Amino acid sequence: MASRKVECDVVFVGGGSAGLCGAVRARELGLRTVVLEKLGSCGGDAMISAGFWLASETKLQEEKGIKDSKEDLYRYLMQYSSYRCRPELIRVLVDRAASNIEWLEKQGLAQTKDIHTHGVTSVPRVHQNEGMGAQYVNVIKERAEAMGAEFIMKAGAKSLILEGERVVGVKAETDAGDSVEVRAKGVVLATGGFGKNKQMVEDHVPIRKHVMVCAGWARGDGVRLAKEVGAAVNDLNCCIGYKAEMPDTAGLSMRSFYLILFSNYAVVNRNGLRFMDESLWNAYFAHALYNQPDARGFVIIDEAMRTGNPFTDLAKEVESGRVKKADDFSSLAREIGVPEEPFSAQLNRYNSYAQSGVDEEFGKAAELLTPLSQPPFYAIEIIPLVLNTMGGVVIDKDARALKPDGNPIPGLFAAGNTTAGFFDSYPSTGMGLQVSSIFAQVAAESVNAGI
C-alpha cells in the first residue's frame, strides 16, 4: 500500500460546513490548508439543510424595520437552555452571527430577502441563503478550492499524532487502503455528529424512539479522536428534536415535510386524544410526542388538506398501509387501532373549536384551527424526528479543545456538531450552520495567532 505525507499549517478533519468555512478563512489568513474528507464529496449535514442562519442586528432586519439586539439573542439562547450553555461560546456566536452572514455573501453565497421566526420567540431572526444547503456547500467549497485549499478525499481519519502533549497532525487511510499522514500546526476536528453510530445513539440520545435524519457518515469520529488524546467530552445527550416523521423512514421525505411539519392539523395519541397545541415549536413537539404512550401519535387530515398540499398523492402510502384512510371518524379509529368513542368525540370537539376560533383544551391560535370537514379522512402515524446529535468536544472561545481540568490541548481545535456547550435542546433553526461556520473560522484564526 502507498503512503503519503503532507505538511501544512492547519488541517480540518471533515469537509462539512465547518471544514469548508474554516478552509476559506484559513486561506484568507495565508495558512497552508488541508481538508480531510472520508467520502468522495463534501457537505455533511449542511448539504441536506435548508440554508438557515440565525442572527441579530443584521442588515436585513434593519431593512425590514425589525427591532432586535445581540443582547436579546444572547439572553434568549441562554434562557432557552436554562443556562446550560457555555456563556463565552454563546457570546462569540451572537457577536459574530450578523457579520458572518456578510462574510458568506463576500464569498459568493447570496442571501434571500426572507426572514423567519423560529423557536419560542416572536422576533424574526432566521435568514436563508439562496439554493438552501446544497448551494451553500457548493459555493464555499468552490471558494476554498479557488483560494488554494487542498482537499484529500476518501480519506478517513484514524488517529491523531502526538508529540509530547501537543497534537501535531492526523493519520488517515484512504478507501484504497493507502495511508496519509498530515502534519500541521493545528488540527481542527469538524466531523459532525454521531447520528449514524448505533451504539452511541443508544447510549446517549434521550429520545429513545425516533427517526434519525442526518448524513449517513455521522459516526462520531471527532469524539473518538478527541477522547483518545484526553480531551473532555460533554453534552452527548443533546439532540435536535424536530417535530415528527413516519416510523421506519430513512430520511425526511418532502411529502412528510409538508404534511407533518407545515400543515394545520390535529394530532392524537394512541388513546385517540389530543395532548398539545400542535403548532408549538418543533423541539417541544418532538418531546411532547415522546412523552405519549409508546412515543407515537397520529396526524389527522381531511381531503381538503390533502389536495391543498404540494404533494397530494397518498395512494401508494394508503395502499401500503402506512397511511390509513376512512370516510368517517369511527371507521378511521378502527383503522388505526384507537378507541372509537374518545377519538370521534375528540375530533368533533376540534371541529367545534375551529368554528368558534377558541381551542378550549390547549389554546391553539384560531387561524391554525383548520376543520376536519371534508371526507375521506387520513391518519398518518408519527414518532419523534431527530436531526442528528449535538455535543462532543469541550472547547473554549478560541475553539481550542480542552482537557477535563479546563486546560487546552496544544494544537487541537474543534468546531460544529462535534462540540459541546451550545445546546440543551434545539432553540432555533439556523443555529447549527452558524456554530459550525463561525467556530471553524475562530479555529483558523487561533492557529494563525499561534494560540
Image (tube, rainbow, N blue to C red):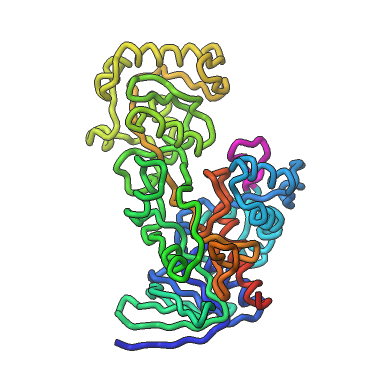
Residue occupying the point 74% across, 52% down = 59
Q: Looking at this rendering, what residue extends furthest in the left direction?
A: 320
* Image spot of residue 16 (x, y percent): 49, 64
Of 89 and 439, nearer the camera is 89
* Image spot of residue 39 (x, y percent): 38, 69
- Count all numbered tags in the image, as a single digit: 0
Residue 9 part of the magenta-drawn span: no
User: Residue 247 occupies which quadrant of the picture?
Assistant: top left
Residue occupying the point 45% across, 16% down = 350
**Quadrant of image for the N terminus:** bottom left
* Image spot of residue 338 (x, y percent): 29, 20
Of 230 and 29, nearer the camera is 230
Is 342 left, or right, of 320 in this rendering?
right
* Image spot of residue 398 (x, y percent): 64, 66
In the rendered view, would you say 87 is above or below 311?
below
Is 289 left, or right, of 437 in this rendering?
left
Would residue 409 be visible to someone looking at this image?
Answer: yes
In the rendered view, would you say 267 is above or below 61?
above
**Quadrant of image for the C terminus:** bottom right
Residue 119 part of the magenta-drawn span: yes
Residue occupying the point 56% across, 69% down = 413
Range of residues picked out in magenta: 114-126
Would residue 135 be visible to someone looking at this image?
Answer: no
Q: Main secondary structure of the magenta part?
A: loop
In the rendered view, would you say 177 is above or below 217?
below
